[in-house]
Amino acid sequence: MTKNITASILVLLLLSTCGIDSSELIFKTNEYRGVAVLQDDALQSQAVAAKNVRIYLTDQDRDTTRYIIYVKTDSTGGFFFDHLPEKGDRNFYMYAHYISKGVIYESTFDPVPSSPNSPPLQIAPKYRPGIRIMVKDSLSGSVVSGVKVCLFNDQSFALGADCSNSIATRTSNAAGIALFDNLKAGKYVAKVSDNIGSFPVSGFAKVTSDASKLTDADVRIQRAGISLQVIDKKSKEPVPGVNVCLFTNELLAADSICVNSLQTIVTDAYGKAFVNGLSSGKHYFVVNDTVKSIVFKGLTSTAYVTGVSPTLKFEVRSYKK
């Protein structure tokens, strides 16, 4: 009993400093326990614990200057309100507000009875208008993480070799996303000019930013190297799962076996493969492999200049083993 009286006195003292008339509120000894997470759907990132975030109890929607009481989340995002006021004829809200790296996270929630199955409170970022870039591989269509994306507001600057005249740079996250917010409406160029490992990649996209929302755009990057597609000469169908061997020596390639090849790559479900890290010059590709009791054989060559090569169609013979 003494504990409850002491807690009520502390709450009343807090109310006197927050601009709320405590005489209008009736407190009862109930509680709300919850867990808060930072959830950024725009970046398609995993929810993380909302650490050291203020959760306000207020009767003024989205007003942190006029609140009844607040608590801070712990290292796991957990928080605890006790002695919640009865609503009477008033509506009460829980309001979360947090700023991280210049991004404002906030959400409003209705207090509900504590439950062990209550879902986490998701605190979402309030991005200002801008551009959301998705970086994808031009061959596979898969997202590409960890590359630098530069944003230009002048197309002529984007033609340069680097990002020295860009207005902002971001690194694509695990979902391949680079987000630029708080932009004025207008035309921009997003450019990727980076290395994956020791291999250069590049790509760009022209984007018109909307003044009222995030604008989505893809930048499809190209890798320096040779892309090829193995085709069955008889059926004209792609050949998946077959080994392709690379040579720079014509005599070794002429043996039509993969002994002493520089590199062996396997075609994907569409019969495609990509090889990079090449020097300029002539390159030879050999197929001498068996897939599901069918033998595929072939030899082709191509001249390569450092950069991005168009897809090489590689026709091979096939026969049953």
Image: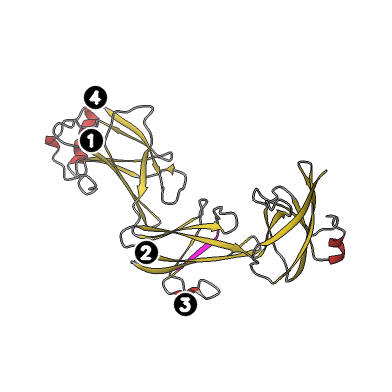
Mark 2 or mark 1: name the one nearer the start of the chain.
1
Residue kind at label 4, given as amino acid type: Thr
Which of marks 2 and 4 precedes in the sequence?
4
Q: Are discs 2 and 1 less than 8 Å apart at CB?
A: no
Q: How many marks?
A: 4
Separation of residues labelled 1 and 4 (CA atoms): 12 Å
Query: What SS does tag 2 mark?
Result: strand
- Whichever of callouts 1 and 3 sits on the residue coming sooner in the sequence is 1
Residue at x 38% of width, y 66% of height: 208
Q: State how far apart marks 2 and 1 are (Cα).
A: 50 Å
Q: CA distance from mark 4 to mark 2?
A: 60 Å
- Tell me if label 1 and label 4 are in contact, CB under 8 Å: no
Please indicate whether residue 69 sits to the left or right of residue 46 in the image. Answer: left
Give the CA distance from mark 1 to mark 3: 63 Å
Q: CA distance from mark 3 to mark 4?
A: 74 Å
Any mark on residue 312, and which? none
Tell me the residue at 16%/45% (across/down): 19
Residue 192 visible in the snapshot = no
What residue is rendered at 16% in x and 30% in y?
A: 26
Residues tagged 3 and 4 counted as in contact (Cβ below 8 A): no
Q: Which residue is mark 1?
A: 10
Q: Tell me the magenta residue range.
A: 147-151
- Density class for disc 1 (Cα within 10 Å; few <14, some 14-19, many ≥20) is few
> Dot 3 lies on which element?
helix
Which is nearer the eye, 236 or 140? 236
